[in-house]
């Protein structure tokens, strides 16, 4: 697959952290269109986290005796970032370099155990 078109589009919309992730992953992996979209969202999350962290550094954890909303949003963005990275499930490039971890997607809906409810 030719990633050059996707790379150009992403390079125009991403900041430093997101662009670094985009370039690193695309250098090491050949992704299909769906995986490219997932990666783009990972990169956007990274950029958003950088902006939120900058706001927290500049304005502090508290604003006018209330929690800085950027702190709460950064926590939520870290969760989204971790889930998107897990969903992308890129394989390890190095073999036999330590313990193998099972790669699982994000948690799906819960199923009823033991039949019908009622």
Image (spheres, rainbow, N blue to C red):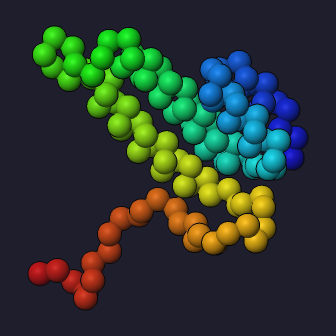
Is 87 situated left or right of 65 in this image? right
In the orientation shown, which residue stands out farthest toward the bottom?
Answer: 114
Q: Horizontally, is 89 left or right of 50 in the view? A: right
Residue 79 figure quarter: top left
Q: Find residue 61 and report its horizontal and vertical position in percent.
A: 27, 22
7 versus 31 height, above or below:
above
Task: Name the residue nearer the viewer: 69 or 111.
Answer: 69
Q: Residue at x 39, y 17 (%)?
A: 57
* 78 to 62, vertically: above or below: below
**Quadrant of the snapshot with the C terminus:** bottom left
Residue at image location 68% in from the left, 56% down from the top: 90
The quadrant in which residue 33 appears is: top right
Report the number of discs.
Answer: 0
Q: Quick check: 6 above or below 107? A: above
Residue 92 vertical placement versus 10 (above, below): below
Q: Is residue 48 left or right of residue 12?
A: left
Relative image position of residue 70 (x, y in whole percent) = 33, 23
């Amino acid at each position: 697959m030719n990633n050059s078109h996707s790379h150009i589009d992403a390079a125009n919309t991403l900041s430093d952290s997101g662009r670094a992730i985009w370039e690193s992953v695309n250098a090491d992996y050949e992704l299909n269109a769906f995986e490219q979209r997932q990666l783009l969202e990972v990169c956007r999350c990274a950029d958003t986290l950088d902006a939120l962290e900058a706001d927290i550094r500049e304005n502090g954890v508290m604003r006018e005796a209330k929690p800085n909303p950027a702190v709460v949003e950064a926590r939520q963005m870290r969760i989204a970032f971790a889930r998107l990275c897990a969903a992308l499930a890129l394989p390890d490039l190095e073999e036999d370099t330590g313990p193998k971890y099972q790669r699982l997607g994000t948690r799906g809906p819960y199923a009823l155990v033991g039949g019908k409810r009622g």
